Image (cartoon, rainbow, N blue to C red):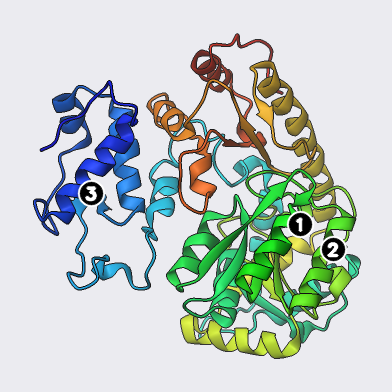
Amino acid sequence: MFALDPQSPTPLVQQIVDGFRELIRAGVLRPGAKAPSIRQFAHAHGVSVYTVVDAYDRLVALGYFVSRPHSGFFVRSRDVRTGTTAEAGPQYHFDSMWYLRRVFENRNLRLKPGCGWLPHDWLFGDGVRRSLRALAAQEVDLGGYGEPKGYTPLRQLVRDLLAEQEIALTGDQVLLTHGSSQAMDLVARRLVRPGDAVLVDEPGYPNLLFSLRFLGARLIGVPRTPWGWDLATLEARIAEHAPKVLFTQPRLHSPTGSVANLAQLHRLLQLAERHGLRIVENDLYADLDPEPRPSLASLDQLQRVIYIGSFSKTVSPNLRVGFVAAHPEVLEDLAQLKMISGLTSSEFAERLTYGALTDGRWRKHLRGLRQRLAAAQQATAERLQRLGFELFAQPGAGMFLWARHPAIDNASTLAYQAAEHDILLGPGHLFGLDLAPSPWLRFNVAFCDDEALWGFLAKATGAQATGACH
């Protein structure tokens, strides 16, 4: 097939990627051909399984391979006229299901410090059960589809909750969605056309990144800093690319945990006004923040800002209830797109969520959850630093810490090793615009209380594991 040279300055992973790319371009490997299994290739070439896994994943991301569950890796069909992947739709080098498969294939690993949700016993399970019992005793119409904009009492409650954050709007400016992911997808389809330059946080939210790529957007990264954004780079990229929209997460950003300060929010809105830029603010972690911070939406009052929220992180991710708030004209367009793609969202789930949110113990639950996360933040930060990790930011709130270690060059290799020990990690390349190798890891502090994790990290970094996480 091709030979590898361990003495070459080119890393083995890159040699494998280059070797397969040349075979595919030369027609030696035809579309639909099955690639050697990971273990077969590793054994035949005397390299680590983790090296081959990393190379194959890059070939998937670049559009040369496609991964089929339980079958292996296959050469992607390519358009002979353009050389691009025939089934890829818009011209982008990205497998749109790759990240989701990685998350859900590994969700059953025993330890999940790399996941994006809270443990079930941290959620408002009691409130949901009480709401379910109350709903079961009511006369519920199961024959209709519900309101296109969502269950009216819940929309009005969202209006009232946003008023507490000094975002003034009417109930008609709220659209309930199937989680925040649907909200972002609807907004993206409303605002983005193929070829448009779109600004996104770098690192950013994988779901959003491949959704925008699927729409044919040209993604322009805005580097995150511990206090918000690199505004000088942002302004330069606005001038160079003339983007239409910025998708961002100012508060308790995933994956970095960073929080944009007030001065940054004001400066961003000034830039948006000057350059005619629309901003989509994903604030799905707002309920996890103990500080009453302003949002872009509260400063702008939904003139340029479209605001997205969710109850998945605090009530239940299984109920899949989110919302978007926007200027009336924009919201009506989003409601139409929602009806085209799925008619309505689940009124049953929205009623359940409404019952939980109007439960007398809801606010007490939120206070307790914030305190629990704050304690986990402190304990996890201390343990990581003790092992020699550098922290990007220390928000003291929310779910995530973004960290790297001088002994780790490629966090994806560490993640594959961790999976062998029943541990799901969140390697940094998942959150990058180009899926390039990264030393960074995202830690979900709510899942960092098991000594097996710290023992594994200590061994991987050559450090000494001491003390409990929390």
User: Looking at numbered disc 2 in the image, what kind of residue is underneath it?
Assistant: Arg
Q: Which residue is mark 1?
A: 231
Horizontal and vertical percent for residue 247?
Answer: 65, 65
Marks 3 and 1, the one that precedes in the sequence:
3
Q: Secondary structure at mark 3?
A: helix
User: Looking at numbered disc 3 in the image, what kind of residue is underneath it?
Assistant: Arg
Relative to 226, 218 lies left or right: left
Horizontal and vertical percent for residue 294?
Answer: 88, 61
Relative to 53, 299 lies left or right: right
- Badge 3 density bin: few <14, some 14–19, many ≥20, Cα 10 Å: some
User: Looking at numbered disc 1 in the image, what kind of residue is underneath it?
Assistant: Leu
The residue sitting at 74% across, 49% down in the picture is: 252
Q: Secondary structure at mark 2?
A: helix
Relative to 424, 3 lies left or right: left
Horizontal and vertical percent for residue 201?
Answer: 64, 56
**Mark drawn on residue 288:** none
Q: Which residue is mark 3?
A: 21
The residue sitting at 44% across, 35% down in the picture is: 412
Horizontal and vertical percent for residue 460?
Answer: 49, 18
Disc 3/disc 2 C-alpha distance (Å): 45 Å
| Along the line of sight, the residue nearer the viewer: 263 or 71 | 263
Q: Which residue is mark 2?
A: 267
